[in-house]
Structure formats: C-alpha cells, structure tokens
Image (cartoon, rainbow, N blue to C red):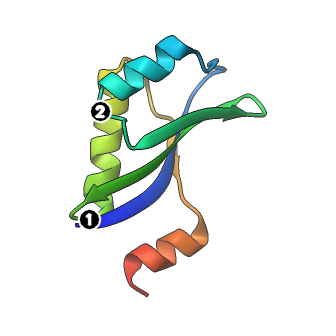
Amino acid sequence: MAKYEFSLILPGRLELTEDLADRLFEAGCDDATPGTCNGVFSIDFHREADSLEAAIRSAIANVESAGYRVARVEMEAEAVVGQAGV
C-alpha cells in the first residue's frame, strides 16, 4: 500500500476544539491533523491505501461519520505528480 497526502476542507467557520479533534480521531482520522488558517478548517491526511481514490473516499467517510461535511479536497501539485507515479 502507498501513503497519500491530501487535505479535506470543511465548510463554515469551525473552531478547532478538543471535542472536535477527539470526534475525528474516534471516527478513524488517527492519520490526520486538523487545523484552521484564516478561518478555513482543514484536515491534513497521510493515509495508506491501495489508491489515491480509496484514500480520499475513506477519509471523507471517516469525517462524515464524525458528523461533519467535506467541502473539497486539496493537494499540493508536487504530491499529485509524485502519487501518480509521473
């Protein structure tokens, strides 16, 4: 399995609290780091999976099972090239 790096961006102006972090961790986001920057709440993942799509789908499912919605997925251009094997 390969390790994939990406961020999930949540909508709204969420505040990073211990409760929110605990809910994400308990939902399976133990390979992620939540945070906020300029009012944007993101969760940075370093997820092992068979494919990038599987990694992203499982991360979204984990976040949604914690009770949150995902607005979008973001990746660094270098990560996309590296993870695509180009």
Horizontally, residue 84 falls left or right of residue 18, namely: left
Q: Residues within 10 Å of mark 2 (few under 14, many from 20)?
A: some
List x then y, in percent, for residue 66. Answer: 35, 20
Q: Which residue is drawn at 52% across and 39% down?
A: 33
Q: Report the disc number at residue 51.
A: 1
| Amino acid identity at mark 2 | Gly
Quadrant for the N terminus, please: bottom left
Q: In this view, does 43 lie above or below 77?
A: above
Q: Which residue is drawn at 46% across and 58% down?
A: 5
Q: Could you say which quadrant of the image residue 63 lies in?
A: top left
List x then y, in percent, for residue 8. Answer: 49, 42
Q: Report the disc number at residue 28.
A: 2
Q: Residue at x 59, y 64 (%)?
A: 76
Q: Which of marks 1 and 2 is in front?
A: 2
List x then y, in percent, for residue 21. Answer: 48, 22
List x then y, in percent, for residue 71. Answer: 51, 36
User: Can residue 41 be seen?
Assistant: no
| Amino acid identity at mark 1 | Ser
